[in-house]
Image (spheres, rainbow, N blue to C red):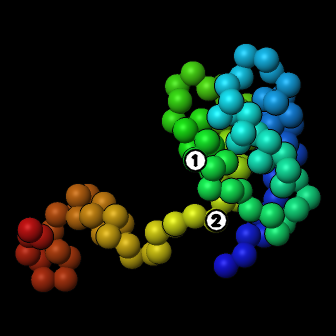
């Protein structure tokens, strides 16, 4: 499925500030650059390298909120492996929250 998302005004502003900040790391700037390049480009997608940088930016505790906003926008526009509804992870999550089978009232094992 083709990406139709674009970077919004808030994320674009955050990406611009991230790129101008001299203390910002390379991964944050890569993600910000990707987000900024997709402001009015609905057919453009984040590259795997930029998506990886965005993911690392979001997980880094030292990253500013603005950089995370830009990274989140870039990651949202990545063509990646997304789990389909009903995936194993979703099933495991439901199992952990609801250990009893509702249909036959037995405990899930």
Quadrant housing residue 107: bottom left
Q: Mark 1 highlights which residue?
A: 52
Estimate how packed mark 2 is, as few (under 14), some (14 to 19) or many (20 or more) residues with alpha carbons within 10 Å.
Answer: some
User: Badge 1: few (under 14), some or many (20 or more) residues near its Cα, within 10 Å?
Assistant: some
Residue 9 visible in the current orientation:
yes
Image height check: is 21 above or below 43? above
Judging from the image, what secondary structure is the residue with disc 2 in? loop
Image location (x, y in percent) of residue 25:
67, 25
* Disc with the residue nearer the chain's start (2 vs 1): 1
Q: Based on the displayed image, in which of its 4 quarters is residue 41 positioned?
A: bottom right
Up/down of 78 relative to 33, above or below? below
Residue at 62% from the left image edge and 26% from the top image edge: 63
> Compared with residue 12, is residue 77 higher up or lower down, i.e. above or below?
below
Q: Quadrant of the N terminus?
A: bottom right
| Left or right of 14 in this view: 87 | left
For image coordinates 68% across by 30% down, the residue present is 26
Q: Is residue 61 left or right of residue 89?
A: right
Number of numbered discs = 2
Residue 8, numbered label: none
Instruction: Point out which mark residue 79 bears.
Output: 2
Q: Residue furthest top?
A: 23
Q: Nearer the viewer, residue 7 or 57?
A: 57
Which SS class for mark 1?
Answer: helix
Instruction: Look at the picture and state if 36 lies above or below 102.
Output: above
Confirm whether residue 76 shows in the render.
Answer: no
């Amino acid at each position: 499925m083709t990406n139709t998302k674009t970077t919004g005004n808030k994320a674009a502003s955050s990406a611009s500030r991230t790129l101008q900040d001299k203390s910002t790391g390379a991964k944050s700037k890569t993600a910000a650059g990707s987000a900024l390049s997709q402001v009015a480009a609905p057919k453009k997608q984040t590259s795997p390298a930029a998506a990886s940088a965005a993911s690392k930016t979001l997980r880094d505790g030292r990253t500013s909120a603005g950089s995370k906003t830009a990274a989140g926008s870039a990651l949202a526009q990545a063509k990646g492996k997304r789990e389909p509804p009903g995936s194993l992870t979703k099933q495991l999550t439901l199992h952990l929250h609801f250990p009893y089978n509702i249909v036959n009232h037995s405990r899930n094992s």
